[in-house]
Every structure is written in structure tokens, then in C-alpha cells.
Amino acid sequence: MPSLFCMRCKSLTPPGSDRCRVCGASVGEVEGKQHCFSDFAFDGKNNERNEEKKTIVSKDKLAAPYFPYEPRESQMDIVKDITVTLAGSDHIVMESGTGTGKTICALAGALHHAKMKGKKIIYLTRTISQSNQVMHELRAISEIKDVSGMTLAGRKRSCPLLRTISGYEDIPPSVLSSLCEEKKAKSAGGGDGCKYYDRVKRFAPKIEAYCRETLPTSDELDAFCESHDVCPYEARKVLIQGMDVIVAPYIHILSEDIRSNLLNHMRCDDDNILLIVDEAHNLISAAREQGNFSIRMKVIDAAVDEITALKDPTLFRDIKAGEFTGFLKAVIKGAANEKLQLGMRESLMEYDRIESRLKEKYSMNSADLLNAVNRMIEIGEIRTEYLLDRGEHKLSELFTLGISLRAWISSDEGQFIKTIKADSDGEMLCASCIDPSDITMFINSMKGAIHMSGTLQPLEQYARTMGLPASTVTKIYPTPFPPENRSVIYLNNVTTKYEDLKRDGTIEKIAEHIISLCGAVEKNTLVFFPSYVLMSRLRPLVEQRIDKKMYWEESGYQKRTMSSLDKFRKGRDGVFFTVIGGSIAEGIDFPGDELSFAIIVGIPYPPPTLESKAMSDLFDKKYGPGTGWTYVNEVPAIRKMKQAIGRLIRTETDRGMAVILDSRTQRYSKQLDAKLSEDPVADAIKFFRR
């Protein structure tokens, strides 16, 4: 009897086997013949993001049982690579170009593996719109396979009771949690509790049926729960243990406390989780931000005032809280006066300067100091409970100070850089995470995970800085869209290099290019600046000379910015001015004629900071001289530019052109697929006439 070959991973399978022993795929009915995914016909016509326009196919037509559409080029390769990698309990790091359908490919491959192994999938996203896309794809899968899923949202976003409190948006999450627990405790005791929580158990079966039938987005689930006077936040906690896919923000994995609660509600341990990280290029910076903390002078001042109200409690031995806090303030003031010379906003701190001064002053050792700070936190907890009982929805300032001070004296020197800074609110101590390995340790230890993005190159840099296992698989899948539909050009007679911007005529020359390019074509145009400062300098030079409807991103005014963006997208010959690297450059789709032309002003290198210098030195030490500049400056800049260019082409019928106003683009022309232009206006006219 001839042997069978797996249609997915091509490994040899003994006769009579129903599934491959390597990747678990169904063997099929064809014997003695080796199959691969390229044997199947590809239809590149179904590329619309709108799921109603995609063709749902029979599960019998595909070797990938959880892939619901007629596949386009490379999609079966992606699903195969994911399935084989997960079967080996490895990580896969992949860059998947626009149009490859990375969301559906990741779900199809992950579900196939997870269902066989009895695992749950946690799909990490950065934005609500990305989580909505996951739910839309799960709906398509549900037409051919039994699958369930649910999106998670924070208490502040989905709790209907808390939204009745005036100013709830400004209440700290820990206070909201305490309020919620207090109300639930009263419900259990038959007191004045939470009516939304009281109805969770009663309506849980109905909500679960709704979730399984409709696979709702986050907002849809919230609306359904609230229509039955049920708390969506608590309902999720009850129902997630029965779901195949949990869609969650990054913090649900990066925060140890939140992750522990999540796994507890899911009734899962580490070995029963399969992780998908979407927009993975954002994960490392999110992990660093999760580790950052500061101690502001205004918090110390508020704590001093609170200590007076508490009649100056004792922290350790005969040391009073008022004296201890007052001396801490004096130490920070002294460091600021010494290190922040005229015009300086930040300076490095000796790593143990604060704690060594405190220990010397009060004849303490490290354990004594930690005991004193822990006592400060205990007093703050009691004070917080008192404030909540009085209806004051805020944390004790002493508690806030104690938590930050404990983190300061406990932080590892190899993972943090300590600085002293000053702004309009006064001095502050800052601890910035430069090596988030402790935070990402959970992800690295998982037996199988998918890390994906449309802009993740160089893949080895991501794997290195994440600390992923040596067995990690890296793959790049290019966009299937016609290359002639996109053009990227650059100029060699301008640059936004700091020294060049100080020269006479440079700003004016950049303005002339923007004005002439915006007037060259009658298309919706996005102009990306590397900073708000440069955008504000150029605004008066271009605003009076562009004869089109213009819109501007307004820093600090998100609602006004989004309102302007909506108007821009409804038109077809407007210009929207924005800063590269923000939500518009990365998180918003512009299908069809909503965007056809992009002007990128300069290379968006990150501004130099003490933190970036420390990270650069760390990478140089770990991986060799020069890698620090590449990882900290070049890679983020190129990724931002790719994200901006990627806004142009979202479907196979889109056509778009990007012009980069910076001669330094020549260094990255290959990565950006950019060509030098001698006459960008003529090139733009020619491209759009074609």
C-alpha cells in the first residue's frame, strides 16, 4: 500500500492515518502523491476588506480547514508556515505585506493547531479597529467551522455604573477597581450594590448565545449587555473561559497582574495558550512604556499635605512620615539644582543617589528603607479606603508616592536608566525601561506564538530585542498587489537634517516642493511631517499658497483632528497635514480615492534623548558596534515611512504615489523601493494620467 504525504507540511504519514503526526493536518483521500499548497488555484479577485464581498467557500475545498475564502497568492503558504511552526512549538516572526490577509491567515493557522491541542488563542491588538477586524474574520470562519470569540475592554470603557460618576475618565484604574469591588461586595450581602453586576449570572446564557451566534465587536457586545442592564465587563469575565479566541489589548499580557487575572478567568495555564501579536513592531515600545514610571514633585507636595491631615504617622522606628518625605523632596531639589544647569531639561542620575542619601540620613540599610516605604504604602491604602467611603474617588497621595518610590529603589540597573527632569509642573525623577526582557519573558517562554506586522523588517532585530528562542522562524510575504499601482520617489536637493534646517532657504525650498506637488494632481493628499515643530514652521509658508481645502492635525485635540479627517476622507481633492508615526499614519485605512498621494517631509529619526542613547549603548554592547544606531534610530524611522506609504494601497484596485523630501532616502532606497526623481511634479502628473 503506498504511503500518504501530508498536504500541508509534506511529511510522510503511515497508511491508515487520518492526520499528519507532524502538523496535525487532515491527510485527505489521495494516496501516493505529494501535495503542496501551490497545487490549488488562486483567485486574486477577492481582495476587498469588506467581508460581504469575499467569497465564503466550502470547508471541503481547502486543505486549510479554517480558511474561509478562495485564497489569493501566498495565503496558503502563510497558513502552512504558521501551522508547521506551531506544530513544532516554535515562534514565527513574519512581515506580511498589504493584501496578504495576515489576520485571516493567522487565525486559520492558529485555530487549526489550537483546536487539535485543546488550546485557547489570545489575539493581541493595539486598537479597537484592529480588534473589530479580528471579529469580522471570525464571522467568516464561523460559516464553515464552529468557532467562538470575544473582545476584551477595560473597566473604564465598558462599565455602565462607573460611567454614571462625574469625571470618571480621570479616576485612576486602581480606584475604579476598588469602587467596583465595593459595589459587588454590597450586592453579595444584599445591600446597595450594583444592579448591572446582579444580573450577570441570570443573563450569562443569553449573552453567550448572542456571542456565539453573532461574534460581536467590542461596541456591539457592550450595547447588547447594556440593553439588558448587564455589566459588559463582568459578563466577559464569566464567559471568556468558553471562547476559542480572546481579542485583547497588549497590556493584558504585558502587565503581570492583568495577565494573571486573565488566565484565571480563562481557566488556562501558560501551556494552554497560543498567542498572536498583531502590529508586533509596536510591542517592544509598549513593553518599555509599561515599565516606565516617575516621581513628580507635585505628588510629593500633595503627600506632604496629606501627612498633615493624618497627624504625621510613623514610618519606621521613630522616623515620621513628614520628616522622611520632606527630606526626600530636599534630596530631589538638590539633585535638580546640581544637574540641571541653565537651559537643561534632563540629566542622568547616579543610580543609587536617592536611596543612599535616605539611608545615610536615617542610618538605615536597604531592608530598613524598604520597610519604611512599605509602611508608607500601607498607610496610603488605609487612607484610600477612607476617601472612597467619603465618596472621594481618588488615590491617597501617600500611596501613589510609596508605590513609585518602592519601584525606584527596587529597579534593576541593567534594565532602567534613571534621570532627573524638569517641566512646567516642576522637577521629577524618571525611570525609563531600556531592556523590557522581564516584561516580555512570558511571551518568550510560550510554546508557540505568531508575531506579525506589515512593517517588521529587519526580522532578526525584532527577534533579538524580544529575546525570542533561537528556533524562531522568520518569514517575509510580499504584497500581491500589482507593483505598477504604486510609485515611491525621492528628491536629492532637500533634507530635514538639523544642521541643514538652520541654513537660509532650506525651509522655503521644502515649502515650494510641498506647494508645487499639492497643486500638481487633483487627488486626496496626505503630507507627513517628522514633528509638530517642523509642521508649525511650514504652515504659514504653505497655507496661503495651496488652492485646495486643507486640514491640519491638532496636537492635544483628538476630536477636532478626527472631525477634520472625516471631512478630508469624504472629499477627493483635499490636503491633510499630519505628523508621521501617529494614528493617522498607521492605524487608519484609506481605501479607493480616499487617499492617492503622500508627501513625506524628511526622515523621521527619533529625537535624541538620554533613554535612546542608553538603549543604543546597550545594543552596541550586546550585538556589536553600530547596531545601536541601526536599532534605535534607523529601524523605527524606516518603519514609520513604510507605514505612511502603506496607507496608499489597501486594495488591488488602489493606485498611489509617495514623494519623500529628503536626500538621505538614498541610503534606504532598497528598503523603501524608492527611486530618485529629477522632476517630481512631472513624475506625479505622468503617474496619475497613466
Image (cartoon, rainbow, N blue to C red):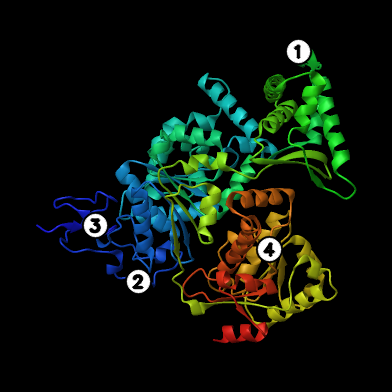
Q: Could you tell me which secondary element the residue under label 4 belongs to?
A: loop
Residue 43 got which mark? 2
Proximity of marks 3 and 4: CB atoms separated by less than 8 Å: no
Going by the numbered disc 2, the residue's amino acid type is Asp
How far is mark 1 from mark 3, CA to CA? 72 Å
How far is mark 3 from mark 2, CA to CA? 23 Å
Q: Earlier in the sequence, mark 3 or mark 4?
A: 3
How far is mark 4 from mark 2, CA to CA? 38 Å
Q: Decide if residue 45 is in sight here.
A: yes
Compare residues 630 and 445 and report the one nearer the observer. Answer: 630
Q: Decide if residue 126 is in sight here.
A: no
Going by the numbered disc 4, the residue's amino acid type is Pro
Describe residue 619's horizontal placement relative to residue 17 as left or right: right
Residue 81 appears at what percent x and percent y?
A: 37, 57
Compare residues 355 and 529 and report the one nearer the observer. Answer: 355
Going by the numbered disc 3, the residue's amino acid type is Cys
Describe residue 456's horizontal placement relative to residue 318 as left or right: left
Q: Residues within 10 Å of mark 3 (few under 14, many from 20)?
A: many
Going by the numbered disc 1, the residue's amino acid type is Arg
How far is mark 3 from mark 4, CA to CA? 47 Å
Position of 498 relative to 373 (above/below):
below
